[in-house]
Image: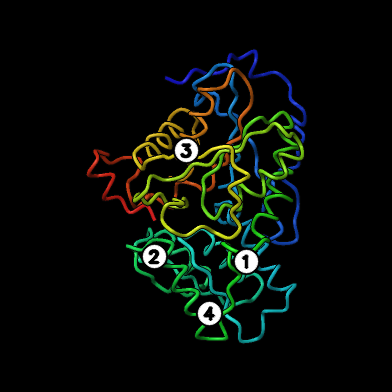
Amino acid sequence: MAVGVPDAERLRPHAHEGGPPHGGRYPSIVDAIGHTPLVEIARMSPNPNVRIYAKLEFLNPTGSVKDRVAKALIEDLEASGRLGPDSIIVEPSSGNTGIALAMIARRKGYRVAVVMPDNVTQERRQLLGLFGAEIIDSPGAKGSNGAIELARYLVARDPRFVMPDQYGNPANPRVHRDTTAEEIIADCPEVDVFVAGLGTGGTLVGVGRRLRRHHPGVRIYAAEPMPGEAVQGLRSLDEGFIPEVFDPDVLDGRFLVSNAESIAALRELTEREGIFAGVSSGGAIVAARRVAEGMEHGTIVVLLADGGWKYLSEDVWTRDLRSEDVDSLNLW
């Protein structure tokens, strides 16, 4: 059972505590992206000498860390002059990046088509429709790799399609270097370990490189799904596609996490800390706890990529999750 940090230690004043500008006033919803809080999750730490802080990325406007990436990708397209009057922004996505692109594109007046596996949750499809995006289905059995393959085929076939390419565009890790990492340093300068799920790799690479400049001894760990398991938002490097933005040299290690472990962790996070996070966040929590168990003392920051409300249709929090039930869950 997790052991919480003693109250006296937990209440110790920190640099920037009570002061960072997480609110503010902005000219548009796009400008409000980022500035997410860092919250201690003391009841989730298995080690009384290790403090774990969660970066709550589901408090971005569309509910995920991908708001940061989508904003950077569209700004990169604008700066490069690739968007014409007939252009259609097309991007492969299991949901979050597509939703973020659709929201920003609607605000800016661009057309968007999202290529996504045909077995994603209904919440994602509904949100994309609300933001005016066209949905192009790819085979669910092929996961995100199938969506990437189809999107690239469409771009090669029709010059109207312009793909910002979260998997290969340096704007992805760059925005995490310039925003996510800077927020972590401001709010938790004593960070010893950073943990996040392995998706495109942009978060781990961008944050990891910047934290290493801040503190050369910081360690960077990835949560990666078990081969053959579909944990939404995470990818296994053993599936044959390694994103161009991913740099394995940034990592100190990778932790394989199962669907069952991820779901158990996100349920515990809701029950013990009142934090309603998504499935990939559960996987990141599993990895963070494994790291904490091996530390004498220190501070871990774990990034929670999205919220739980996009998974409600799958009864992740309530159904009996025996092994066969886990396998039947539609977590894309």
For residue 267, above or below residue 14: below
Cα separation between marks 4 and 3? 35 Å
* Marker disc for residue 139: none
Mark 4, secondary structure of its residue? helix
* Marker disc for residue 104: 1
Instruction: Identify the amino acid type marked 4.
Output: Val
Of the two numbered discs 4 and 3 in the rendering, the one whose residue sits closer to the viewer: 3
Of the two numbered discs 3 and 1 in the rendering, the one whose residue sits closer to the viewer: 3
Q: Quadrant of residue 20?
A: top right
Who's the residue at 42% across and 31% down the image? Answer: 268
Is 204 left, or right, of 19 in this rendering? left
Mark 3, secondary structure of its residue? strand
| x, y percent for residue 46 | 49, 21
Mark 2, secondary structure of its residue? strand
Of the two numbered discs 2 and 1 in the rendering, the one whose residue sits closer to the viewer: 2
| x, y percent for residue 207 | 67, 45
| x, y percent for residue 302 | 57, 37
Cα separation between marks 3 and 2? 25 Å
Instruction: Identify the amino acid type marked 3.
Output: Phe
Query: Is 317 or 154 nearer to us in this picture?
Result: 154
Label 1 vs 4, first from the N-terminus = 1
Determine contact: label 3, label 1, CB under 8 Å.
no
In the picture of the structure, the residue carrying the numbered disc 3 is 255
In the picture of the structure, the residue carrying the numbered disc 2 is 117
Cα separation between marks 2 and 4? 18 Å
Query: Is 145 or 270 nearer to us in this picture?
Result: 145
Who's the residue at 65% across and 44% down the image? Answer: 36
